[in-house]
Image (spheres, rainbow, N blue to C red):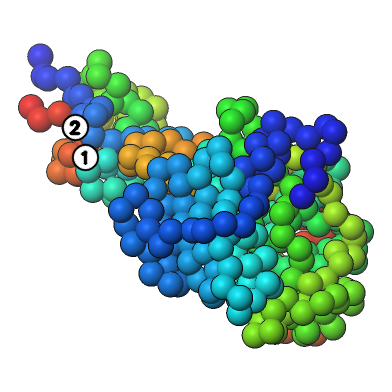
Amino acid sequence: MPLRPDSSPAEALLTRETQLRYGQVPAELDGVKVPEGGHFLSGSAYLLRADGLSFLYRKGEGITVERRPDADLSAQSLWLGGSVYAAIACINGFKPIHASAVAYQGQVTAFTGPSGAGKSTLIAALGQLGLPMFCDDTLVLDLSDPAQIICLPGHKRLKLTPAALAMTGAEGQEKVGAAIDKFYARPPGGEVGRPLPLGRLVFLEDGADLAAREITGAERFTRLTDDHYTETLFASARQLDRAAQFALQARLAQQIPMTRLTRPRDPAQFAASAQLAAKLVRNEEKST
Amino acid sequence: MSKKVIKARGRFSETAIDDEIVVMHLASGEFFSLTGTGRTLWLLIDGTRSRDAIVTAAAAQYGVEAADIVTDTDEFLAKLGAAGFLEAG
């Protein structure tokens, strides 16, 4: 991704660290053999081997890729934007979380939930309502300023299933991969590509009724436990003891307003849930 | 004079979120959420008060007689002690 002239130090660092070159990649890292389909993070290095591809990242040296002749290029792109990028972010002190986000009036509203919760679909729908996409699937947080949590612009393209394309009216582009039933899509509301503070984190949940509810107290703290692969990478890279993990989680809980958005997964009610999400983003919805 | 109630500072981390206090036992990783009276009592254990002084201060805060809350306070302190959040003594 090219750097803007006004890129932040964090963006410049990640751009530099994700420089790519092709070359030989060993099957082990720091004496640990990594099998095909496995990955290993060791201090300031990361090795991933999958789909006939091997990726080795070393801090300060960028990424080396070795590709078997039969390897799928689309898989290379997915691994680079997924686990490899997340590992590099973690090694360099950033915290990736499993969320898709939009921007509004200089702040980011991020929507999180397990895979299949409808994060990308919602982002596409919010784009149709005039809210530009900030990121899809992974939101990288810069925690270097104790006073605020800064979100770094997304590095992944929006990916939607055929059903999500139909439901949101987003414009589909090429298929993500031969074996993946998703298409890249142009974000209907455009994209915001500069760092912005995190304004709110919204947890997407299934439920019978459409409702938004503010998350308060200790629940904000416990809600931050994420089962996404990025959480494991962050723990491996930062090697935080329990007290340090607690301090980080406490900071996030104190600084991030959180809301639970419950909605039926009925396509007939999708437009209403997108409207409610848009109101949350625009601070027009007073959640209970 | 009864002994002061002292928190075992090195054994836990705590943080306040809204009107709750989250305490984590560092050895076990177990979390506790303190609200209402539990939060009040936890904040009164500041290293300067004995059990009796905690009861008196809590009673004053809630506008009740000390006798009305002494049992609850003892139970709460016993739980904190069992969880390892208080210095033995």
Given contact means CB atoms under 8 Å apart, are the residues at marks 2 and 1 in contact? yes
Q: Nearer the viewer, residue A136 or B25?
A: A136
Instruction: Give me the chain letter of mark 2.
Output: B
Q: Which of A67 and A51 is in front in this view?
A: A67
Whether A182 is drawn above or below A257: the answer is below
Whether A116 is drawn above or below B62: the answer is below
Identify the element where label 2 is drawn: loop
Q: Residues within 10 Å of mark 2 (few under 14, many from 20)?
A: many
Cα distance in 3D space between marks 2 and 1: 6 Å
Asked if marks 2 and 1 fall on the same chain, the answer is yes
| Left or right of A267 in this view: A148 | left
Q: Mark 2 points at which residue?
A: B86
Query: Measured from the top left, where is residue B80 in percent x and y?
Result: 21, 40
Q: Is residue B75 visible?
A: no
Query: Measured from the top left, where is residue A262 in percent x and y?
Result: 65, 69
Q: Nearer the viewer, residue A43 or A8?
A: A43
Which residue is drawn at the image coordinates 37% and 58% (left, top)?
A: A28
Identify the element where label 1 is drawn: helix
| Left or right of A64 in this view: A280 | right
Disc 2 marks a residue whose amino acid type is Leu
Which residue is drawn at the image coordinates 29% and 30% (left, top)?
A: B65
Which residue is drawn at the image coordinates 45% and 72% (left, top)?
A: A37
Whichever of callouts 2 and 1 sits on the residue coming sooner in the sequence is 1
Quarter of the image where one finds residue A263: bottom right
Q: Name the residue under label 1.
A: B80
